[in-house]
Amino acid sequence: MGRGSVRGHGVPEAAGRAAFSRVVRPRVVHTFVHTFVHTLVLCALVCAWFRVSTAPLGAQTPVFDVAEASIPELQAALESGRVTSVDLVDAYLARIAAYDRAGPMLNAIVRVHPGARAQAQRLDRERAEGRVRGPLHGIPILLKDNYATFDMPTTGSTLALAGWVPPDDAFQVRKLREAGAVILAKTNMHELAAGITSISSLGGQTRNPYDPARNPGGSSGGTGAAVAASFGVVGWGSDTCGSIRIPSSVHNLVGLRPTKGLSSIDGIIPLSHTQDTGGPLARSAVDLAIALDATIGADAADPATEAMRDREPIGFRASLDAGALDGARIGALTEWLTDGADAPVTDVVRAALDAMAAAGAEIVEVEIPDQDSLLARTSVIGHEFAMDLADYLAAAGGAPVASLGEIVALGLHHEQLDGTFRRRSEAGPRDEAEYTEALERQGALREAIVAFLDEQGLDAIAYPTLRRDPALIGSPPVGGTCQLAAHSGLPAVSAPAGFTRTGMPTGVELIGRPFDDARLVSFAYALEQAIQPRRAPPRTPSLVDGRAPDPLRFSVAGDGGWAGRPAAPRLEGSFSLDLPRGTLHYVISTAGIGAADVHAIVLQRRGSGTRPNAVVRRLSGPGLASAEGTLALSAAHLDDLIGGRLELALYTADRPLGAVRLPLEPGG
């Protein structure tokens, strides 16, 4: 890697770097009423609770909230003078302080850039002087901790590289600085990108903001969690086999694994140079498109990008079309759209496919002939990881370790990576015959998929990004579908499809032909416009005066309509809902009934079209007329509470089928 230079206002410019048979099946259109109603209720809650103000220094204090704000919205606020770039940096840093090490304790950020405010000040001066570089000017963004930066450590989230600062920027980082982006922070990742649960020796375990008991996918899980929680407007990850798409799916984000060669991987710590790609994760297709436009292009340091030199420029934002699905022919991959354990995700993805059909797409059921055999022995990660890492560290220079074997020998890695790292560092010389065969099989896979798209007249093939909900932390993840795109080099976009009955987001993946990236993103945009799937994590709400909001207190009381009847019981409950922690404290009491006559006091679901009217949590049992405690809520139960779908119920000896039922409405 060559030494980067700093010019003008300290923004690095270009510098030399070292190389491195189908069935058509109609579907019923899903209305997505649940998502719409939930959004209205949550918005009412948020609006009732808090506002946050970030304004230019010395100015009046107009309300502006960075939570869920898009790049165009931030840019409009900057252009109007409502905020400065420094204000935006401060607002995002306040959210990181409130929710990354406190509240839900997401642990998504490895390190904040110490010069973020100074970057923002320089860009504010440029704006004041009439120079605006483009839509990213003054916008704070996030980088996965494997993107090289000349002015802060790049570690791959391994303790072995904890203080190492590369000599210059990765290609995409340089492009971002040239576009005027503010590098705000580095995000945690699965150590050296070698997994999909985002745990590392330097960064620890990142948690999913929709349910901190679940993992955030990976290896770009820190980026996914941070963008979902609005720690930055957009963030960059890398994808070797699902590492952009899986975190996008489980965080209600949109992310593209680009065609191999669309953007440079120079300066990204490698896992497998053949399969590695890099790019953004975003809360909307518009933000994704803006971010992609800033970072794609040919790079002499990455031979794979030579395919871009003679190609017409790809304009992602210009290609966005809400009508893109009209007339498109999409193949629904039946092998990965199954029932049983996969049904919760399959149902949501099928509903998204119905929405695509309603938007004018023809959805056909397809099976790729010999899919399993085509995918067999196509991964080259095991052949390339150790050698690529050693080559990268040697070329960059100055790293405290020189190889994966040295990291293992010194114990500078997380124990959950020990087996993988030892196996790959002790494998001995690479079996060149097996490696060559794997590369050849990747080529054959790519040709087979493109031929299948052509033969069936398909514009894309659709399937779940991940066939199961994200695993609970400590449990192995299952349901991956990453290989089809990763091992073929073809582009694939993961678009939000909705939420499963567990309250977790899930995504639909669309794979297409080489360099059809912009069209795939436009399909994602059209789906987004049709179903409006974005729902912010309830555990990371807007701040109040720069801090997490206080718990919301509400109460219920009544006799459930039994007034005037003999021995009418009365039930009262006081509640305190702490959204960031996802906890509900309760104090329950009864009157007009003896303790011996109480069977139970419970939280019960009021019922809906898809979920049973069942007991959610038992608060007290037989002979207990009062109760006090704190509940840790799952994503689904928090979702139900916010949505007004829970009730407090009293069951008694006289009325064993329910004496009193009181709806819980926190936003009421």
Image: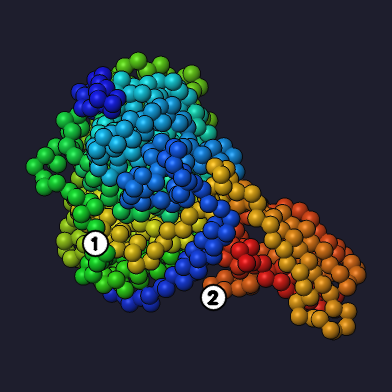
**Splitting the image into 4 quarters, where does residue 241 fall?**
top left
Sooner in the amino-acid sequence: mark 2 or mark 1: 1
Left or right: 544 as drawn, with respect to 246: right
* Residue 90 position within the rendered picture, expressed as x and y whole percent measured from the top left: 46, 37
List x then y, in percent, for residue 321: 24, 62
Point 84% across, 74% down: residue: 569
Q: Is residue 44 visible to us here?
A: yes
Foreground pick, 289 / 405: 289
Residue 210 image point, x, y percent: 52, 52
Q: Is residue 613 above or below residue 154?
A: below
The three-letter amino acid code for the residue at tag 1 is Asp
Residue holding disc 1: 321
Q: Secondary structure at mark 2?
A: loop
Question: Which class describes the residues within 10 Å of circle 2: few (<14), some (14-19), or many (20+)?
Answer: few
480 and 174: which is toward the camera:
174
Query: Looking at the picture, how far across and down is residue 445, in whole percent?
Result: 23, 50
Reply above or below: 555 against 612.
above
The residue singled out by tag 2 in the image is 609
Which residue is found at the position 33% from the left and 38% from the top? 138
Q: Nearer the viewer, residue 140 or 357?
A: 140
Instruction: Tell me: residue 567, above or below residue 180.
Output: below
Q: Quadrant of residue 221?
A: top left
- Dot 1: element: loop
